[in-house]
Amino acid sequence: MAGALPKANGSSAAGGSPPQEGVGLSETGAFGWVYHLGVNSIGREYCHLRFLLIRGKYVEMYKRDPRESPGLKPIRRGVVGHTLMVEESGRRKVNQGDVYVLRFCNRLDESKKGEIACATAAEAHRWIEAFDHAKQQAEYELSRGGSARTKLNMENEINLEHQPRVRRVAHGLRNLIKIGQGPETLLRKSSNLNTVGSEYLRGDDGDVIEAHEWKCVRTVNGIRIFEDVAESKNGKAVLVKAVGVVDASADIVFEVWDMLTGDLELVESFDGHFDVLYGTCEPKHLTRWHSRRDFVFSRQWFRAQDGTYTILHFPTVHKKCPPKPGYQRTEINPSTWEIRRLNTSNASRSARCIVTQMVEMQPVGGCWRKNNQWSKFEKSVPYAFLSQVAGLKEYIGANPSLPSEFSTTSLRSKFSDISSSNSEHEDANVDEFYDAVSSESSSDDDNSDSEVEFDSKDKKVKLKNISWAIASLALKRTSGPDLNQELDTTVPPIVLDPRHYHGSFRQGKDEKDSNCWTSPSGAAFMIRGKTYLKDNTKVKGGDPLLQLIAVDWFKVENCIGKVALQPSSLVQSEAGKKLPFVLVVNLEVPARPNYSLVLYYAADRPVNPNSLLGKFIDGSDMFRDSRLKLIPSIVEGYWMVKRAVGTKACLLGKAVTCKYLRQDNFLEIDVDIGSSSVARGVISLVLGYVTSLVVDLAILIEAKEEAELPEYILGTVRLNRVKLDSAVPLEV
């Protein structure tokens, strides 16, 4: 009954029978069929089937498979530059088919843009990952400096706009391996949503310590049903969840998730991650005079950096769906889905994931857990929701071919691959593929630093994520970080009193104060411990290294950067100029109007240039993007908002566009939240409840080598029930 994403079944939008080939990834690159979307010179939209090849830092696009046409020249070719941005734009209907769209643009010139489309969300993220690794190769060559930097800068960007470009024969494809099902299912027809589908359980896997009192109240069809006793004590609502382990990957479960839906119709789609649906049902336990029910709900979904899918369902109204004669309009219960992968042992090759369906419901006559009340609950809509987890598990278990239909192989480049040269491309006159790449690899993925074996016989890949390796060239250290070594201990500390520094947003007096900020300790956040690379152990964070001294809350017509250069900025004041170092974090919030939340973190001593913080401050944007991490936490607020925001750490530079300004005694980080459609969707939900939310944020630099462990928290902030109208115009 809870809606799902429309499925597709088998046709091509480009016409004809597309080649029977899929998407491939390997140690050296990726290949596969995609659809190139765009607008031609006379303003007509086009959707062309294209063969895309990524090898090293080079990208080529063909009209046909170059393996079947020796000597074929690409219609477009270039390199992935360090300014490349790749964003997953969600699901879109193209020529009666549902696809997942990737948008490309240049971080420095947004007029350069283009789009390609993939069959599934999983394939879209594989392409994002492939572009990310191509970008890392280009960045590695830039990090070597000298002739490599000059040569790379001379190479132009590839263009995905209408005018095609050049030149060169593809070869060496035997080194690439296949992944995905390819164009035979690339653009599948949208379903009408009328199809009805026939040991290790643990708490939420996040980086924030949360107070939940989950009690298992029933086991139904092998699925455990829990009640949040802490949430239920307020007497207003009961929070219930069903949890089950499914023997399939999170990507597969997400793709077949809509097999459980009832009679649903897509009413309107606002973007690739948000839509409105209309549904009907006829509960069998009701009399025939009251059995016909209909409902309208909105749905929002997104995929986190660690590969976890989150889907939110809200009851809603829509002008296209007035009440129908003969139907009783029912308001569905707010609910969420979470599909999260489980780590499996090396001996087991089978993927598994944990599926959680959470529903908000009203108490059924007191203690609904009692047997006499359970019979009533079994006839309720919330119970129908919770039963879908069991249905999903049974459906996948009864269809063992599903894993092979949606099978994928993740890409993990080796550092040796990055350092090796592509001699056949070194002297090519090519265009640069514009954009900085958004990665799906989680900043806190427990397996993100582990290796996977490659064997040509069974196609098992052993590769290693190299984003940390590139940046670590300048960070060779012999011992774990000591907070006393991050700052220069030879200089006496100064006294940091927030009362001497003034921002436009008020500092709170205590935790009960509202429309203000405070600075909590880091004890509520879980960060990487000293032995994390060996046993994935995380520990409670300590006090922040930097002190939050002021916060600005601005209302602006257009999101702005370089706030620290404004004459009215704290950094430009006499008190600010005397500070040893200031970290300015400008969170650009997209809304109507737009907002900027500016956080000022100060050090009481100069920063040690040889420390991890020192390398971050004066390092490259590539290094900063690969290390700047944020952990969110909704301390108080509506549970649906908590589920949407989550508690997992996020690499900001991989999720949204971050720009850096290093001058004098400060580093400013401008975080463009609106650069990601997923981030825009989450922030719009947060803003709708912001006056009732208490939000904690922790900022830190991710540790990726043993010499950098344990991690430490750079700074924290608590935002207490912020009022949007309290924002002030920025004085320019």
Image: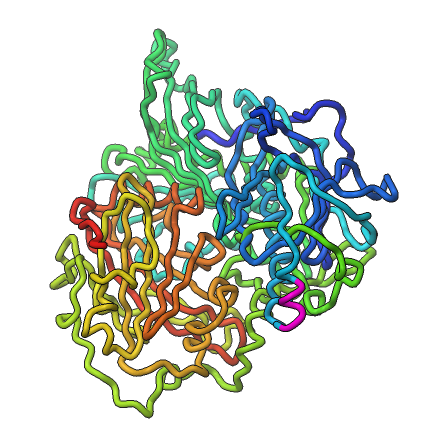
- Quadrant where the C terminus is found in the figure: bottom left
* Number of numbered discs overlaid on the protein picture: 0
| Residue 641 vertical position relative to residue 323 in the rendered view, above or below | below
Q: Please tell me which residue lies in front, 672 or 350.
A: 672
Query: Would you place residue 199 above or below residue 266 in this image?
Result: below
Does residue 356 show up? no
Q: Is residue 140 left or right of residue 283?
A: right
List the single residue furthest toward the right: 70
In the picture, which quadrant includes the N terminus? top left
Taking the magenta stretch, the answer to whether it contains residue 718 is no
Give the colour scheme of this rendering: rainbow
Identify the magenta region: 146-151
* Residue 368 seen from this side: yes
What percent of the width, then of the height, locates residue 430?
Answer: 70, 52
Residue at image point 49% right, 52% down: 107
- Expressed as whole percent of the image width and height from the top left, the position of residue 155 reads 66, 56
